[in-house]
Image (tube, grey):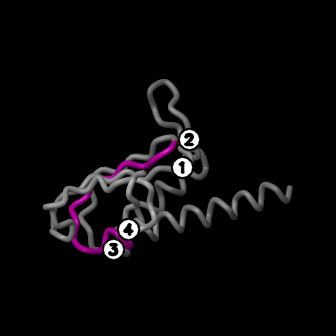
């Protein structure tokens, strides 16, 4: 049986044991949707076409620079995930957490409005 990471995840950590992830460095982050469902849009003619929730994800990410002290790099919304490169300066975890929460809340509000019609 696979050992649980932090006593809650059924996958082993992909983190390099000898690396201190608190160090200031450049990092590559992928945030995936639950069950890899394509909430954020579709690729059409080799270009990303954002759905309304994909547009929100893009807008909210670009607002993070006003709330967190990070040097943001590349950000790309894909159909079922977002790709981020950045230079870590301590607050990216809070920034990513806030980003995920804001997108999720706004998405559920949009669903509620759509279902009421």
Mark 2 or mark 4, earlier in chain: 4
Magenta segment includes 93:
yes
In the picture of the structure, the residue carrying the numbered disc 3 is 68
Mark 2, residue position: 41
The disc, 1 or 4, on the residue closer to the chain's N-terminal end is: 4
**Residue sitting nearer the eye, 66 or 22:** 22
Q: Which residue is mark 4?
A: 6
Disc number for residue 54: 1
Furthest residue in direction top, as rendered: 45
**Residue 10 sits in which quadrant?**
bottom left
**Distance from Cα at disc 2 to Cα at disc 3:** 27 Å
| As drawn, 50 above or below 110 | above
Residue 7: which numbered mark, if any? none
Q: Position of residue 44 (x, y in %)?
A: 52, 28
- Between the residue at mark 3 and the residue at mark 1, the CA separation in whole angstroms equals 21 Å
Mark in the foreground, 1 or 4: 4
Q: Is residue 76 left or right of residue 39?
A: left
First in sequence: mark 4 vs mark 3: 4
Does the residue at mark 1 contact the one at mark 4 (Cβ under 8 Å)? no
């Amino acid at each position: 049986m696979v050992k649980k990471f932090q006593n809650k995840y059924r996958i082993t950590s992909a983190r390099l044991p000898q690396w201190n992830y608190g160090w200031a460095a450049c990092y590559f982050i992928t945030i995936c949707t639950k069950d890899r469902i394509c909430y954020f849009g579709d690729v059409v003619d080799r270009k990303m076409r954002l759905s309304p929730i994909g547009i929100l994800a893009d807008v909210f990410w670009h607002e993070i620079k006003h709330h967190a002290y990070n040097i943001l790099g590349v950000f790309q919304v894909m159909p079922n995930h977002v790709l981020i490169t950045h230079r870590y300066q301590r607050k990216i975890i809070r920034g990513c957490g806030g980003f995920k929460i804001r997108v999720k809340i706004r998405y559920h509000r949009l669903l509620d409005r759509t279902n009421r019609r």
